[in-house]
Amino acid sequence: MYFFLVNLSFLDICSTSSVVPQLLVHLLVEQKTINIAGCAAQMYIIIIMGLMECCLQAAMAYDRYVAICHPLHYRTIMSGWACAQLAGASWTIDISVEVAQTTWIFSLPFCGSSRIHHFFCNIPQVVKMARMDTSKNKINVLSVSVLFIMGPFLLITLSGFPPHSEL
């Protein structure tokens, strides 16, 4: 469990570190915009950290499930290697999905200036700047969101049920 808590702490530090510096800049300067490259970097980091948090919480739910339902086998099932594999798989999947999604979003043709008038860069803001029909893009973003939010949610929910209910 502590291994996953360390990972979650790291995610929170990275998330905060990607937004707060831009917020501080916006408090100090008059022109409150962010360029496309900064927006892409911020979006990439924020979304990866969000996806990772969902996946790590599902791994933590599995860890608690094993600890409660199989206490005598906990050390063999949730070894250090198994925890590292769960975290590594989460990182690998999340990074690959987000690299593809961010690259795809920032390959859209944008109209107007290449500056966004916010300190926090989010997918809907960037997609609105595109000068083409973005309905397919919105469906892709929604499907990734549903997959990475509802998937771990269902795993967390299912981990709350014992394997054999005794009535």
Image (tube, rainbow, N blue to C red):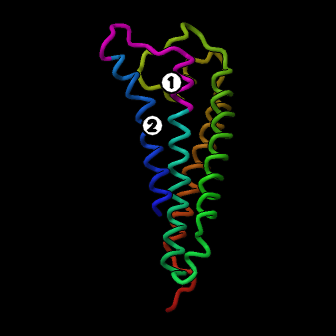
Residue 81: say if magenta: no
Q: State the residue at coordinates (55%, 76%).
A: 74
As drawn, is 75 to the left or to the right of 107? left
What is the chief secondary structure element of the magenta stretch? helix
Q: Nearer the viewer, mark 2 or mark 1?
A: 2
Badge 2 element: helix
Instruction: Give the mark nearer the N terminus: 2 vs 1.
Output: 2
Measuring from the top left, give residue 36's x and y in whole percent: 55, 16
Q: State the CA–CA distance, disc 2 to disc 1.
A: 19 Å
- Outermost residue, bottom direction? 167
The dot on residue 67 is: none
Residue 43: say if magenta: yes
Badge 1 element: helix
Q: Name the residue that disc number 2 marks.
A: 15
77 over 121 or under it: above or below: below
Q: State the residue at coordinates (42%, 29%).
A: 19
29 over 107 or under it: above or below: above
The answer to which of 13 and 62 lies nearer the viewer is 13
Measuring from the top left, give residue 83's x and y in whole percent: 59, 61
Q: Amino acid at mark 2?
A: Ser
The answer to which of 79 and 156 lies nearer the viewer is 79
Q: State the residue at coordinates (65%, 31%).
A: 137
Q: State the residue at coordinates (33%, 21%).
A: 24
Q: Amino acid at mark 1?
A: Gln
Measuring from the top left, give residue 151's x and y in whole percent: 59, 56
Q: Name the residue that disc number 1 marks.
A: 125
The answer to which of 125 and 73 lies nearer the viewer is 73
Which range is magenta?
27-44
5 over 91 or under it: above or below: below
